[in-house]
Image (tube, grey):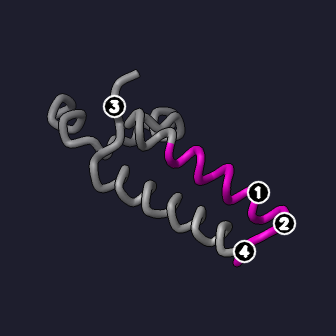
Amino acid sequence: MKKNMGTIDRTIRIIVAVVIGVLYWQNIINGTLAYILLAAAAIFLLTSFISFCPLYAMVGLKTNKEASKDKA
């Protein structure tokens, strides 16, 4: 797997995942919506830590500066 996520993209995903976690912890979100958002947060964290997004790979999107330099 080649890295296809840039630093800004990874940071945004981590922030969104943390916000979802805090909203759940504070009991602001609950029920089915909470579980769906927690699953999305887990996926965001996983893809951020490995710097690879399978959806980006399927559509050919790369936000990684090094990957963009290789393409040019």
- The Cα atoms of the two marked residues, 3 and 2, are separated by 34 Å
Mark 1 = which residue?
35
Q: Is residue 15 left or right of residue 38?
A: left
Q: Label 1: few (<14), some or many (≥20) within 10 Å?
A: few
Check disc 4 and give the amino acid type: Asn
Residue designated by label 2: 31
Closer to us: 44 or 65 = 44
Q: Name the amino acid, label 1.
A: Tyr
User: Callout 2: 10 Å neighbours few (<14), some, many (20+)?
Assistant: few
Check residue 30 for magenta coloring.
yes
Task: Please tell me how crowded label 4 is: few (under 14), some (14-19), or many (20+) other residues with Cα within 10 Å.
Answer: few
Please name the residue that numbered disc 3 is placed on: 3
Q: Is residue 21 left or right of residue 15?
A: right
Does the CB distance between marks 3 and 4 fall below 8 Å?
Answer: no
Span colored in magenta: 27-45
Q: What is the secondary structure assignment of the residue under circle 4?
A: loop
Residue to which mark 4 is pinned: 27
- Say which element carries label 3: loop
Label 2 to label 1: alpha-carbon separation: 7 Å
Q: Which mark is residue 49?
A: none
Identify the mark nearer the N-term, 3 or 4: 3
Magenta stretch, overall SS: helix
Between the residue at mark 3 and the residue at mark 4, the CA separation in whole angstroms equals 35 Å
